[in-house]
Amino acid sequence: MRIAVTGASGRLGGQVAELLAGEPGHEVVALARPSSTYVPPPGVTVAAADYADPVTLRKALTGADTLVFVSSDGHAATVMLHHANVVQAAADAGVGHVVALSGLDVDLESPFCYAVTNGHTEQLLAASGCGYSLARASVYTEFFAALVRGSRRGDAAGGEVRLPAGDARVSLVARADVGRSLAALALRPPSNTHHDLTGPAALSLAEVVAALDPAARYVDVPPAEYVAALLDGGETSWWAHAYATTLESIRLGRWAAVSDEVAALTGRPAASLHDLSEG
């Protein structure tokens, strides 16, 4: 079976390509931008393709049986265009199974800036004629840990982590667990449904902060205060918006679901926040 992987020069796509290369009997093709310096691991070949260039995508996907579609990044409107290009190229190339990375929040009415890209991409896949499996990942533990570090105020002996997320809970998932799940789905027939990839528990923001930074305490702040702090620190307006809407979506409980899909797909339990903070 020939398996193509987008975003292979990134951490998640690269992990998936390497995992699949270790499975006997499969040809793994990593899609990377022509300007990329990506060096493939043994057993992986590279095809030049760009999310913004439908011609290169179609050429790279010709002959592929399965596509692991790791989502694009950046402004939501650009991401939607990129995703439409990938889905159309997969359909044109006759790809039989698209394993698509999505998110728990796919509600087109959600405040989360990427919920509309997730939901729209899922709709495109359902109408594409390709078989598909949707990997709806929760918030990555590594991403949220960076948010906590960036929002900390005070000295090492104490301080506050100031985030606008209320008393909501979030089922953080390790990026490596998402990668293993994507690889596992690629080796299965299309499910034509979604798989929720979460950590083993939904933790409160206070519990998350206590695990990541025991010397600090979580403080809920208004979104405007959080955005102002990001902008004052040099963040761009788009990413300040993206982070704030992520946290608003968490505040609304859209990332609190817990499932056992990681274990069901990979044969290993999902890593807990304690596992990662102690590792």
Image (tube, rainbow, N blue to C red):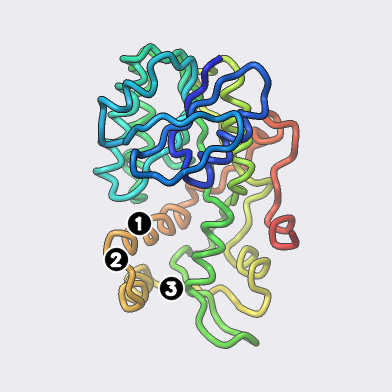
Please tell me which of labels 3 and 1 falls first in the chain: 3
Viewer-proximal residue, 243 or 53? 53
> What is the tally of numbered marks visible in this picture?
3
Residue 207 at what x, y percent from top left?
65, 64
> Which amino acid is tagged 3?
Val
| Circle 1: element type | helix
Please tell me which of labels 2 and 3 falls first in the chain: 3
- Residue 107 visible, this orientation: no
Q: Quadrant of residue 277?
A: bottom right
Q: Which residue is mark 1?
A: 242
Q: Is residue 98 above or below residue 71?
A: above
Q: Quadrant of residue 142?
A: bottom right
In the visual, does 186 lie left or right of 57?
right
> Which amino acid is tagged 2?
Thr
The residue that appears at 28% across and 29% down in the rendered structure is 85
Q: Is residue 257 above or below residue 204?
A: above
Residue 247 at what x, y percent from top left?
44, 59
- Residue 234 visible, this orientation: yes
Q: Which residue is mark 2?
A: 236
| Circle 2: element type | loop
| Circle 3: element type | loop
Camera-near label (3 vs 1) is 1
Q: Quadrant of residue 114?
A: top left
Q: Is residue 81 above or below residue 156?
A: above
> Which amino acid is tagged 1?
Ala
Viewer-proximal residue, 161 or 49? 49
Position of the N terminus by quadrant: top right
Please tell me which of labels 1 and 2 falls first in the chain: 2
Q: Give the CA distance from mark 2 to mark 3.
A: 20 Å
Residue 120 at what x, y percent from top left?
32, 32
Q: Which mark is residue 221?
A: 3
